[in-house]
Image: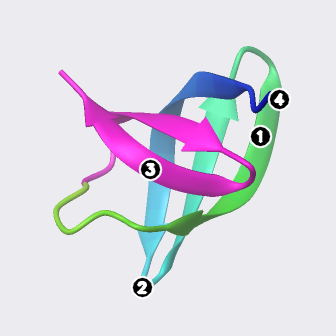
Amino acid sequence: MCLAYKAKVLKVNKNKLLVASGKEKKEVLNALQEVREGDFVLVQQGIAVDLID
């Protein structure tokens, strides 16, 4: 079973994103076409896989 979590995008850097979930910040791979700072994404196994409205 894979867990996914919601995170806020703090910084976009080509194919990587700096995201925050709670008090934790992580750098994850970006698998999305259009993502901007301030967007919320679904992160699974270190990859941003979906944009959350």
The magenta region covers: 36-53
Q: State the SS at label 4.
A: strand
Q: Which mark is residue 25?
A: 1
State yes or no: discs 1 and 2 in contact (Cβ < 8 Å).
no
* Dot in front, 4 or 3: 3
Which amino acid type is marked by label 3? Answer: Val
Which amino acid type is marked by label 4? Answer: Glu
Name the spot of residue 1 as percent of width and height, x first: 80, 27
Name the spot of residue 34 as percent of width and height, x first: 16, 62
* Residue, disc 3: 49
- Residue sitting at 63 percent across and 23 percent down? 5
Q: Can residue 39 be seen in this view?
A: no
Q: Sequence-wise, which precedes: disc 4 or disc 3?
A: 4
Q: State the SS at label 3.
A: strand
Above/below status of 17 relative to 22:
below
Q: Is residue 8 left or right of residue 21?
A: left
Q: Does the magenta stretch include residue 44?
A: yes
